[in-house]
Amino acid sequence: MQQTFTNPNEHGYYGDFGGAFIPEMLFANVAQLKSQYLQIMDDEDFIKEVNDLLQHYVGRPTPLFLAKRLSEQYGTTIYLKREDLCHTGAHKINNTIGQIILAQKLGKTRIIAETGAGQHGVATATVCALKGMECIVYMGEKDIERQAPNVARMRMLGATVVPAISGSKTLKDATNEAIRDWINNPTDTHYIIGSVVGPHPYPDMVARFQSVISAEIRKQLLVQTGTELPTHVIACVGGGSNAAGAFYHFLEEPSVQIVAVEAAGHGVQTNMSAATTQLGTPGILHGSKSLLMQTTDGQVIEPHSISAGLDYPGIGPMHANLYTSGRGLFLSATDDEAMDAAFHVSKTEGIIPALETAHAFAALDQIKWKPTDTVVICLSGRGDKDLSTYMQKLDS
Amino acid sequence: MTRLKKLFDAKSSKVLNVYCTAGYPTLDSTLPIIAALDKNGADLVEIGMPYSDPLADGPVIQESGAKAIENGMSIEVLLDQLKSLRTTSNIPVVLMGYMNPVLQYGFDKFCMAAAAVGVDGLILPDMPAYEFETKYGAILKKHQLDFIFLVTPETPTERIQYLDSLSSGFLYAVSASATTGAALNFDAVDAYLQKLKELQLNNPILVGFGVKDAASFELATRYTTGAIIGSAYIKALEKSTDVSATTAQFLSSIIGKS
C-alpha cells in the first residue's frame, strides 16, 4: 500500500503514527487479520453481503440533509450527514456489520468488544444477534453505572456485559480487558474494535468500513449541488471512527478543509479535558503509536468529557497524522459549548444529536463562514442515550 | 562476558528467575528484595517497571504496578535506586516493562542509564520485531544490553527461530496463551516445551506464566533451562511485613533450603 493521508504503509504507519505494538500472545491473531483483511474486503461476495445488510438492515444510504435554518444563521450552506438514522442510532454499526462478516470468513465463532458509552457495544451485540454469534462486551464498571439503558440493550440482544474493574474502570480499561480476553482466547475469538485505534490493521480496517459515510456524501452532494466536493467537512473526534469515515474520500482533495473537533471537557487548560491533540504527546496505547495524554513518566492520564464517547486519552493514528501534518484543522469544544449546541440544533432543525456529535456543531461558532462555503457535518449519532444528561439541563 | 552469559554457562538447568515489581510493596523495597532474592537462591531477577496499562499482565501484577505508581515509582526513581545495585550484588538483573514509559524517558537515554547502573537486559513485551530490527535493536546493542523476546504455544516454528535469532540473554517461553498469573495446564504445555527443546535454539529458554510453586517449577524446567515466577511471589509480598523473611520463605518453598 502506498502511504497517503488515507492509507497507512504496509507496517501500519500514517506518517510517524500507527504500527502494531502488541505482545507476542496477540501476534498470530493480528498477523492473520493483517494478511487477510484487504483480500477479504475486496472479495465480491463479501462486498455484496456487506452492502446488502447496510441497505436493508442498517438503512443506508443515510440522508444528506440541507439544514436551512442553521445555514441562514451562519450565513453559509450546511448539510448534515444523518448517521443518527442508522439502525441502533449511530455510525458504529457500519463497522460492526463489516467486521462480523469478516470474522465469519476468518472462521471465528466468538466475538469480543469494548465499549464506553455503550454505542459500539450495542452495535456489536446487534450484529452478533443477527449472525447468532456469542458476544462478550467489556465495559468499565463506572460506565456500566452511568449508561444503564445501553447495558440493558446489550443484555436484551443476548450479549454478556463484563465489567472492567482494573485501572480507572472506564473505556481505556475496558479496552485493556478486551485485549486480555483476546490473549486468553487466541483461536476462536475475533475482537471487534469500535474505533480507528488499536494495532495495525485495525485503524485502516475500521476507517475502510466507515468510509461509506464520505462515499455517500460525495454522491449525494453531486446530486444536490452539482459538485462532489464540499469546502469543509466537520466531525467530532474521540478515537475518531465517524471522523475517519466522514473524511476518508476527501483526504486527498486539498480543496476540502478537514475539521476535527475534540472534547475540551471543562477546558483545555484545566485538568479535566479530552483534547488529545492539544494535550497529548507521542506515545503508545492499545497497540499503536499516536498522540496520547500521559504524564512525563509515561503513565496514561484519565481524560474527562461530558460525552462518554469522546472520553478517551488517545486518538487514532490517522488523525494524529492529520494533525501534525497540518492536513486537518483541529478544534475543541467544552462540555458547556457542546450542551448549548445540542439544544440549539434540537430547536433549530428538529434533530436531537448525541452529545459527541454536539461537539461538531459547537465548532460552527469557531470558524468565520463565507456565503460560498459548503459545509458537511457528520451527525454521527442521535441523542436518546444522552437524555438523562439533557434532562438535568432542562430541569436546572 | 555478560552476567547473563556467565550465569547460563555455569548453570544449564533449574535456573530460577524471580519477578518483582519495582516500588512494591513499598517504594524502597526494590533493593532489599534484590538482595534477599540473591541471598536465598534466585539466579536471576526480573524487575517490573510499573505501567498504567499493562496488557500482558493479569490482575496480581496489574495491582502491584498500580500500587507502585501510587508509591511514587517511576523509571527515573528506579534507575536512581539501582545506582547502588552493583555495590552489593552481582546477580543478573533484567528490567521488564512496556514501550510507552521507556519511550517517554527516551529509549537511548534509558538504555544508557540502565547499562550504567549494571542492568543486564530488557524485556518489553510490546516491542515489535519490526521496530527492533529497524530502530531499537541497534541502540540496545550500542549499550550492550540483552533483549529478550517472548514466544508462545501459538508461535510458529519459523517465527520462534526468528525471535530466537533477535534475542540475546535468554528466550522467554510463555507457557500458555494467557496473561500473567493464569493457572497452568501442564499436559498441554509439556509437548510445547519439548518441541522448544528439540529446536536447539541459540538462547537458553526460561518458562514463564503460571509457574507458582515447587511442583510447577519442576515441570516447567523438565525440558528447559529454567523458569520465571512472578504473580505467586507478588502475592506473597502483598501481606509481607518483612520482605527479607518473606523472600527466604518463598524461595525455600520453591527450591528447598539453599
Image (spheres, coloured by chain):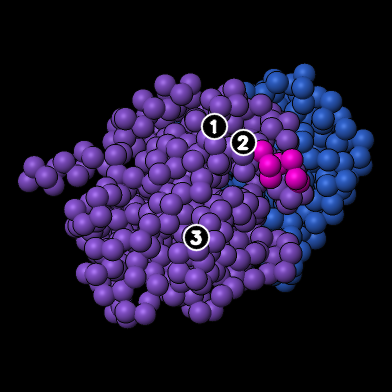
> In the image, is residue A100 above or below residue A382?
above
Over which residues does the magenta segment extend?
A: A43-49
Measured as percent of width and height from the top left, residue B159 is found at 83, 47
Residue type of the residue flagged with mark 2: Ile
- Callout 2: residue from which chain? A
Whether A45 is among the magenta residues is yes
Q: Is residue A227 left or right of residue B172?
A: left
Please give the residue where the numbered disc 3 appears in the rendered image: A220
Per the rendering, the colour in which chain B appears is blue
Q: From where the camera sits, is residue A232 visible?
A: yes
Name which quarter of the figure residue B251 lies in: top right
Dot 1 lies on which element?
helix
Residue type of the residue flagged with mark 3: Gln
Please give the residue where the numbered disc 1 appears in the rendered image: A127
Residue type of the residue flagged with mark 1: Val
Q: Is residue B37 left or right of residue A118?
A: right
User: What secondary structure is the stretch in magenta mostly built from?
Assistant: helix
Please give the residue where the numbered disc 2 appears in the rendered image: A100
* Letter of the chain in purple: A
Name which quarter of the figure residue B219 lies in: top right
